[in-house]
Image (cartoon, grey):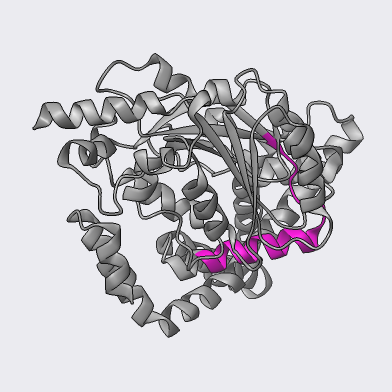
C-alpha cells in the first residue's frame, strides 16, 4: 500500500507543471478535505515535497501609490514566479484597476481576487487556497523585492536532499529609507541581519515561503486576528517540527525592501495595533509586563529620587540617563549602518529622534495591549473553541471535522 501512495504522490507531482495549469491540480496538493492517506500526510512533517512550481501571493488594500513597486519587482525576478495571486480587501483608490492593467500585459499568470472586508489573514488564506502549486511564497503590497528574492527563497528546496526538504523558509527584509526620520525609525524598530538568531527568528510574511501542505496543517492564517497574524502562523508552523528549534530554514539573501512609517501619528497607530494584536493573541505577556514595570515603576522612582530624594539626588538623574542610553544604545549602533548615507547633521538629527521614537512606540504598546487583552476576555468562548481546534489538529483531525466542530 505504501508503494501505491508513493506512486500517487509522484503522479500528482508530475501533473503540476506549466503546461498543465488545470483546476484539478489544486486538489492534488491540498492535503486534507477528505483525501489524506497516511503517506501523504507525513509529507507535512518530514518535508519530502520537492516541487518547484511556485505561487507568489500577496494581499492589498488601498495601495495605489505603492503597488507598482511590488509589481515591477515581481516582473524583474531572476526566478520568475509560476503564478501570482493577489487578494484585494476592497480597495477604493484604484488599486485593483492598476493590477488589472498590469495583469493584461504580464507574461506571468496573474489572478486577482476581490474580497471586500477581508483582513490580511483572510486575504492570504483565499490566495493560498486558489494557488495551483505546492509551494507558496508570500509577500506584501508596498514592498520592493530584490531581483533575486524568489530565487534565494526557494533555493533551500533545490539544495536539499531527498527526505530532508524544508517545509518553510524565512527570508529577510531591509528598510528602504530616506532622510533622518525614516532612518531613525528603521534603526529603532528593525533588526539587522547580525541581530538575528536563525533558530529563534519569527519571519514576517513579507518574505517567507512554505509548502501548501504545511499551511493547511498549521490551520492557515488566523482569520479572527487582525494584526500579528503572521506571528501566530509562524508559531503554528514551528509546532509541525517539534524536534527542531525552528521549522524555517534561514535564507538571509531573500530580501525585500520596505518603507517604515514616515510620521509619528502613523507610527503610533501601527504599534498600537501590533500591541492590540499581541493582547488578543496572548503573545509576549512577560515582555509587556517588563515594559509596564520600566515605565510605571523604574522611571518614576528615578525621577522621584532626583526631585525629592533624601540623599544624593543626582543618583536619580544619573540612573535615568544611564537607563535611556542603555535603552537606545542598540538603535544608535544600527543607525551607523542604516544612516551611513546621511550627513553629520542629518545623522545627529536621526540620533535625537531615536529616544522619542522609543517612547512613542512603547506608549502605543502600553495603550494597545490592554485593549487586546480585554477583547480576548470578552471573546473567551471563541478562544476556547480555537484552543480545542488546535488540540484537534495536533491529534490529526481533518479540516472538515474542525469546521463541523465550530459550526
Bounds of the magenta span? Answer: 257-277
Name the quarter where the N terminus is drawn: top left
Taking the image as shown, residue 375 lies to the left or right of residue 363, namely: left
Residue at x 45%, y 61% (from the top left corner):
222
- Please state which of residues 195 and 234 is positioned toward the viewer in this rendering: 234
Taking the image as shown, residue 349 lies to the left or right of residue 173, namely: right
Name the quarter where the C terminus is drawn: bottom left
Residue at x 39%, y 27% (from the top left corner):
15
What is the x, y in percent for residue 243? 21, 37
Residue at x 58%, y 58% (from the top left corner):
120
Is residue 273 found inside the magenta-colored segment of the image? Answer: yes
What is the x, y in percent for residue 248? 39, 34
What is the x, y in percent for residue 242? 23, 42
Residue at x 37%, y 77% (from the top left corner):
382
Is residue 300 found inside the magenta-colored segment of the image? Answer: no
Report whether residue 255 is seen: yes
Amino acid at each position: 500500500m505504501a508503494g501505491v501512495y508513493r506512486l500517487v504522490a509522484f503522479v500528482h507531482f508530475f501533473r503540476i507543471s506549466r503546461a498543465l495549469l488545470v483546476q484539478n491540480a489544486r486538489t492534488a496538493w491540498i492535503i486534507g478535505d477528505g483525501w489524506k492517506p497516511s503517506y501523504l500526510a507525513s509529507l507535512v512533517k518530514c518535508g519530502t515535497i520537492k516541487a518547484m512550481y511556485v505561487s507568489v501571493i500577496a494581499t492589498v488594500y488601498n495601495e495605489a501609490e505603492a503597488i507598482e513597486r511590488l509589481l515591477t519587482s515581481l516582473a524583474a525576478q531572476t526566478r520568475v514566479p509560476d503564478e501570482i495571486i493577489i487578494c484585494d480587501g476592497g480597495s477604493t483608490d484604484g488599486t485593483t484597476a492598476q493590477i488589472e492593467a498590469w495583469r493584461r500585459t504580464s507574461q506571468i499568470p496573474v489572478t486577482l481576487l476581490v474580497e471586500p472586508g477581508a483582513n490580511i489573514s483572510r486575504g492570504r488564506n483565499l490566495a493560498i487556497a486558489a494557488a495551483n502549486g505546492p509551494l507558496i511564497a508570500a509577500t506584501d503590497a508596498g514592498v520592493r523585492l530584490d531581483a533575486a528574492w524568489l530565487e534565494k527563497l526557494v533555493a533551500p528546496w533545490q539544495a536539499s536532499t531527498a527526505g530532508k526538504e524544508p517545509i518553510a523558509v524565512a527570508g529577510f527584509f531591509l528598510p528602504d529609507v530616506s532622510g533622518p526620520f525614516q532612518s531613525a525609525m528603521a534603526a529603532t524598530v528593525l533588526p539587522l541581519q547580525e541581530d538575528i538568531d536563525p533558530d529563534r527568528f519569527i519571519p514576517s510574511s513579507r518574505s517567507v515561503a512554505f509548502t501548501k501542505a504545511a499551511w493547511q496543517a498549521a490551520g492557515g492564517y488566523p482569520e479572527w486576528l487582525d494584526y500579528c497574524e503572521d506571528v501566530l502562523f509562524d508559531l503554528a508552523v514551528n509546532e509541525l517540527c517539534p524536534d527542531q528549534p525552528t521549522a524555517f530554514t534561514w535564507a538571509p539573501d531573500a530580501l525585500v525592501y520596505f518603507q517604515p512609517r514616515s510620521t509619528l501619528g502613523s507610527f503610533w497607530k501601527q504599534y498600537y495595533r501590533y500591541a492590540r494584536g499581541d493582547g488578543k493573541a496572548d503573545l509576549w505577556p512577560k515582555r509587556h509586563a517588563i515594559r509596564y514595570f520600566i515605565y510605571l515603576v523604574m522611571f518614576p522612582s528615578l525621577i522621584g529620587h532626583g526631585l525629592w530624594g533624601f540623599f544624593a539626588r543626582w543618583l536619580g538623574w544619573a540612573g535615568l540617563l544611564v537607563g535611556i542610553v542603555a535603552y537606545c544604545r542598540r538603535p544608535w549602533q544600527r543607525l551607523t549602518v542604516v544612516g551611513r548615507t546621511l550627513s553629520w547633521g542629518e545623522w545627529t538629527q536621526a540620533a535625537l529622534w531615536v529616544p522619542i521614537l522609543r517612547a512613542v512606540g512603547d506608549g502605543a504598546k502600553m495603550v494597545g495591549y490592554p485593549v487586546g487583552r480585554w477583547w480576548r476576555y470578552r471573546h473567551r468562548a471563541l478562544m476556547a473553541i480555537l484552543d480545542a481546534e488546535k488540540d484537534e489538529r495536533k491529534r490529526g483531525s481533518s479540516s472538515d471535522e474542525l469546521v463541523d466542530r465550530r459550526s
